[in-house]
Image: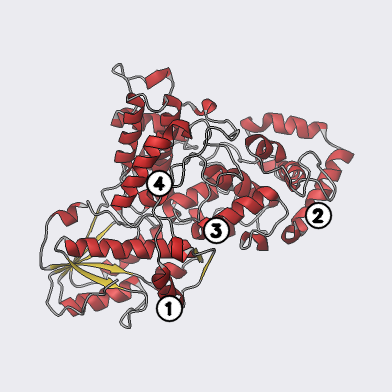
Amino acid sequence: MTRPGREAAPAHTLRLVLGDQLNPQHSWIATRDAGVVYVLMEVRQETDYVLHHAQKILAIFAAMRDLARHLRSAGHRVRYVAIDDASNRQSVPGNLAALMAHYGAQRFEYQHPDEWRLDEQLRHWCAEQPFATQAVGSEHFYTTRSEVAEVFAGRKQWLMEHFYRRMRHQHGVLIDEAGEPEGGQWNYDHDNRKPWPGTPATPPDARPVHDHSALWATIVAAGVQSFGNPQAGQLRWPLNRAEALAGLDHFIATTLAHFGEYEDAMSTRSPHLFHSLLSFALNTKMLQPREVVQRAQAAWQAGTAPLAAVEGFIRQILGWREYVRGIYWAHMPGYDERNALGHTAPLPQWFWSGDTRMRCLQHAVGQSLDGAYAHHIQRLMVIGNFALLAGLDPAAVHRWYLGVYIDAFEWVELPNTLGMSQFADGGLLATKPYVSSAAYIDRMGDYCKGCHYDKKLKVGERACPYNALYWDFFARNEATLGSNFRLGMVYRQLQKMQGPQLEALRGHASYLRSNLDTL
């Protein structure tokens, strides 16, 4: 992109726009003021706090540069600090201090960050400044940061279903004239658990293709470390709101109708199946959750998508997305340090290569490394399932998920990983650990076909590792999980296996956990 000159004209206000605040409709932007300078910056502080997927860095930088172009074309003043600018201090506070002095500005404004570390950093920095500062809302979410905590005040367990029903009523989503849920049910999850047989055909990937090779060369030359395939010459993530809206149109028209039935399915024949691929655009705020929910509801009203599919999709946005954000803000700082089951094993080396003989993990991890994306069942019931059964350190799992996925920002990723996937919060978010043996993975997909391991075997060199690890997990954690009302059947089965059968399973699981790199 063409870089701005070193503007000498003074400004009275600097406004910071972060890399996940790429909303060209924010009320800030409605009015032009020659005394306001919008600041966007590419900094090592943000590329380096965890090791990020190459596509994540590339897509965010490219979209930030595109928003800067949009703001300039709309008549706003913009200062864009590129990753290789000589004046780049490589930290948000360092650049802000220099720019406030450069422009002689007497006021600094920013939108509330969605990550606790950035929120704390900016809050402390502002408190130390002699000039006026103000934080404003991002104008994105349905809820405030504290709303979920207020809903669950005094409750030991924060169940999403209670919150979701409240949100449906509050915002009039899929509610009939009598105030009841459309169709007579709040939740159609039981209709949304089918494996995909190969038909109907999945729609083509309609996302635009961008050549960011020059930007990628700049990022590499600047010394930024990353992992995964950059796909720099053919990156398929949206640059701006217009492209994001085109993606929403495509999903509503071609994909939503089948989303529900197959949202939990997995297949080597389709990396995306009927998922929307909108999470990156949503989490960088190119799209607004309200417009996405409204479009989905309108599709049901028009008869182009069934209620079960629309409800399942809306639940992810109006329910789950807002819910996990509330969990995050209610329990930070410190939520990222929780480890209720005391798991400490390091990640196997194949988390960084996909080089494992377990076909499900080879595909799910490999897809993540290649495309910076996996859908939620791959994340939860393949990768996360294995991580929990194997006793991997939840903080290390969290850092990997935060780095590898294009849509992963800590407010949404941390509760999903630490709470939902790894049960490290001790059951605050999930009523039970989400684990399974090979049977579930086989039932919901085709991963077991052609795998080195046999899904039916529990012990031995060819036995699927999930099987022994599953029973060992519950045996190891009986003191913590044995009284869980949702695990009664599991522990009754475990009791019947006492003796040589369980000893063999646990012995094999111990071997597997000692040799994770070679599986």
> For residue 278, which numbered disc appears in the image?
4
Q: Position of residue 446 (x, y in %)?
A: 66, 40
- Mark 2 or 1: the one toward you: 1
Residue under numbered circle 3: 370
- Identify which amino acid the numbered label 2 is placed on: Tyr
> Which residue: 70% across, 44% down?
477
State which quadrant residue 75 falls in.
bottom left
What's the CA distance linking mark 1 and mark 3? Answer: 23 Å
Depth check: give the residue in front, 509 or 8. 8
What's the CA distance linking mark 2 and mark 1? Answer: 43 Å
Q: Where is residue 464 in the image (x, y as percent from the top left)?
A: 76, 45
Label 4, residues with CA under 10 Å away: few <14, some 14-19, many ≥20: some
Q: In which quarter of the image is the C terminus?
A: bottom right
Residue under numbered circle 2: 511
Q: Of the residues under marks 3 and 2, which one precedes in the sequence?
A: 3
Q: Of the residues under marks 4 and 3, which one precedes in the sequence?
A: 4
| Above or below: residue 415 compared with residue 255 | below
What's the CA distance linking mark 1 and mark 4? Answer: 30 Å
* 182 sits left or right of 139 in the view: right
State which quadrant residue 434 falls in.
top right
Q: Do the residues labelled 1 and 3 touch (CB within 8 Å)?
A: no
State which quadrant residue 181 falls in.
top left
Q: What element carries label 3?
A: helix
Depth check: give the residue in front, 519 or 251. 251
Q: Are marks 2 and 1 in contact (CB under 8 Å)?
A: no
- Identify which amino acid the numbered label 4 is placed on: Leu
What's the CA distance linking mark 2 and mark 4? Answer: 41 Å
Q: Position of residue 283 (x, y in %)?
A: 38, 51
